Image (cartoon, rainbow, N blue to C red):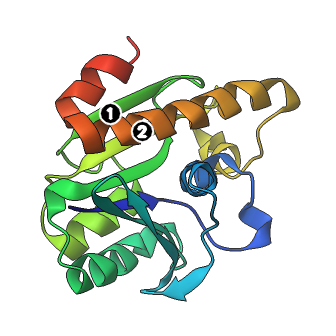
Amino acid sequence: MRFLIVGLGNPGAEYDDTRHNIGFKAVDNIASKFGTEIKRKGYSSLYEEINCSENKLFLIKPQTFMNRSGKAVHEIKSFYKIPTENLIVIYDELDIPLGNLKIKSGGGSAGHNGIRSILNSIGDENFSRIRFGIGKPLRREKTVGHVLSKFAKDEKQIVDDMITTVYEAVIEIIENGVESAMNKFNNN
């Protein structure tokens, strides 16, 4: 089977290591677990193909900026005829505390521009989402600055642990389905 694993973020060195780019870091970690890097250019993305058991995984980091991520997802999904239920999107979530993640299947965008773009581009909500908690600022007007900020030194180990958990969750979804991953990894 073919699976499309999308890490959401923004291209450019100024966005490296920001909270909003946690999806990029997560797919980079998945690639490293398979002894490779995501360097190929195409489909409005940086991407890599990986063999995992009897499955082919397409890891992508859209290079269209967050609010146009759907363009990249649609291009590669259409070209390789990957069913929507085999799409896994990893992204940051303000409403989840740092150190937690939530896995779900289907639903709306909940205000996330990257997810809204994907929904509009593929016309189907029935894909898996791994939402990586980045916490929220105390004041709402500080939201943009928060998502574009880098993790503090005391947060780095938490982030590294969660990135490892995201890898495990992706493998669980591929091998046993999203329901199994939800039961195993969703924090309360």
140 and 2: which is toward the camera: 2
Quarter of the rendering containing residue 143:
top right
68 and 137: which is toward the camera: 68
- Amino acid under disc 2: Arg
Instruction: Say if 81 sits above or below 85 in the image.
Output: below
Residue extending farthest front: 53
Percent x, y for residue 88? 32, 52
| Number of other residues with Cα within 10 Å of mark 1, as a class: few under 14, some 14 to 19, many 20 or more | many
Whether residue 103 sits left or right of residue 106 in the image: it is: right
Quarter of the rendering containing residue 136:
top right
Q: Judging from the image, what secondary structure is the residue with disc 1 in? A: strand
Residue at the spot 58% in from the left edge and 30% down from the top edge: 162
- Amino acid under disc 1: Ile
| Number of other residues with Cα within 10 Å of mark 2, as a class: few under 14, some 14 to 19, many 20 or more | many
Q: Judging from the image, what secondary structure is the residue with disc 2 in? A: strand
Specify the label residue 103 is tagged with.
1
Q: Which residue is mark 2?
A: 131
